Amino acid sequence: MVAQRLQLKLKQQLSLAPQLQQAIKLLQLNRLELKDYLQQALEENPLLEYQDLGAESAGDADTEADAATDEYLEDPLAGEWDDADGFSITGSGDFSAGDRQDQWADTGSDSLQTHLLWQINLTPLSATDEAIAQAIVFALNEDGYLLDSVDDIRNSLAPDILVEADEVTAVLHRLQRMEPVGVATRSPAECLAVQLETMSVDTPHRHSALQIASKHMHLLEKGDRRKLAQVIGVDRDEISQAISLLQSLEPRPGARYDNRHNEYLVPDVYLRQHEGDWVASLSPDSHPNIRLNGYYVSLMRSVKGDDKGYLKGRLQEARWLLNSLELRNRTLLAVSNQIAQHQSGFLERGEKFMQPLILKEIAAATGLHESTVSRATTRKYALTPRGLFELKYFFSSHVRTLDGRAISATAVKAYIQEIIGREAPASPLSDQALSDKLREHGIRVARRTVAKYRESLGILSSTQRRRAAKLQTDSYRAESAE
């Protein structure tokens, strides 16, 4: 019989105030999600309303609402409120701006993120695991792939939620088996492998297909079925059947939810040059014209008992929301201004002048935590003289030059693209030759790194480029002969 005993353990746990939780949530939402969130808040809370700037009574309503608020509720956010990241804001009675509701984009009724969040909500998860799952979902691209590493997910949750790598990995594996199966994987090969793993073990040709997806996709890409049959130890017919099974799967788990054709992007910030300096300004659409409803606030003077308690609670929630919106905009503006200053070279002269930049540098300059900077730059877009870019685009790792200076990975990619653009189509440069060319520009990059950057640009290998050039030449000759 197993002995039973009592054991006392001490445990530290970080607890966030409700208003801070709301501020963090609003910061990580993109424009469309923010719109939906605010719409739901307006429907649920009678103390909130859209402000009609054309109404003659708007000023009187504001004055009455502020007076009633001061009388019946001492707002805990009024005055200086310091969040966990050390960023202070000043509370205010209402929050309003120009009416630009018509600029919200329409992305359809059910996105991949919405579908996954719905499943997460129905899955029995701890509060920590649910937060991890949500962080993973928000890091997915349109195809349903996870581009961030496990450490990136951990950092996005810190310091609010501190987790170990194995906790993130466990939640990730669970999420990958939700519908659509294979979501949150890192590559088509991993996506196909996950889909095969969820199939019944007696599915015909599953074992061979799983071996191909897990270990031998490079041979499949080359079309070398003979070598595949040899390394797996099966006949050519089994390989053909396994490949047919692979072709029946979905390598892009987010494809059916892809609604980019209904979507247009509207910038969250504008980066402009003013008197020689690059500065950021918020889009007018970043200021949803929401305010306190003066009528319901004034009712607190006449109601008593439970009704009064209900209205005071809703007023508390409304003011938290308005202050959280203000904090979101201040954070976004502070981060964008620092990005503009760091990347002035890119804004003026292009990708070759992009500077190395990491979250830690912007965090130090703004006094924010790295996780806050990450939330503020994810799925937020800046309009610049060079186009529309996600704010995360301006962050880039560094590569050392021969003279010891640092150059951004984005700049190195620009050099690679330029060199390949000038090569002779019949004699394309190998990755080693590209590495040698980069050294002529004073950039020391290994062949493997060049290959990684080239693939990220969607540029074929030298062998594939040579083959494509030959096919194009042969096709042109055939057309000329006709």
Image (cartoon, grey):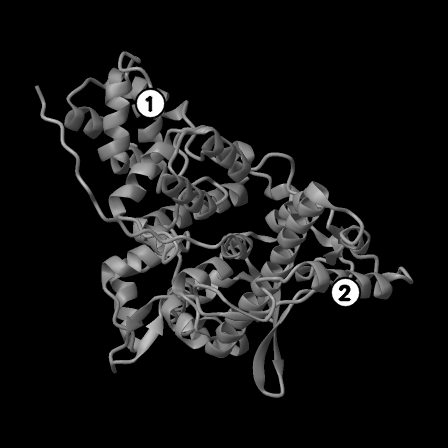
| x and y percentages locating residue 287 in the rendered image | 69, 62
459 or 40, which is in the foreground? 40
Placement of 302 over or under 447, stated as above or below: above
What residue is at 41 percent from the left and 51 percent from the top?
458
Type of the residue with mark 2: Ala
Label 1's element? loop
Q: Residue 241 — which label?
A: none
Please name the residue that numbered disc 2 is placed on.
67
Picture quadrant where residue 266 is located: bottom right
Q: Which mark is residue 198?
A: 1
Furthest residue in direction front, as rendered: 305
| Residue density around tag 1, few if under 14, some if 14–19, many if 20 or more, within 10 Å | few
The number of numbered discs placed on residues in the rendered structure image is 2
Task: Tell me the CA gap for discs 2 and 1.
Answer: 61 Å
Residue lying at 60% horizontally and 57% vertically, measured from the top left: 320
Relative to 172, is 4 above or below?
above
Quarter of the N terminus within the rendering: top left
Q: Is residue 43 visible?
A: no
Q: Residue furthest right?
A: 56
Residue 200 seen in the current view: yes
Residue 9's x, y, as percent? Answer: 21, 45
Q: Dot 2: what SS? A: helix
Left or right placement of residue 101 versus residue 250 in this view: right
Foreground residue among 423 and 234: 234
Q: Residue at x 27, y 66 (%)?
A: 435
Image quadrant occupied by the C terminus: top right
Looking at the picture, how far across and down is residue 113, in whole percent?
A: 52, 39
Q: Position of residue 110 (x, y in %)?
A: 60, 34
**Which is nearer the N-term, disc 2 or disc 1?**
2
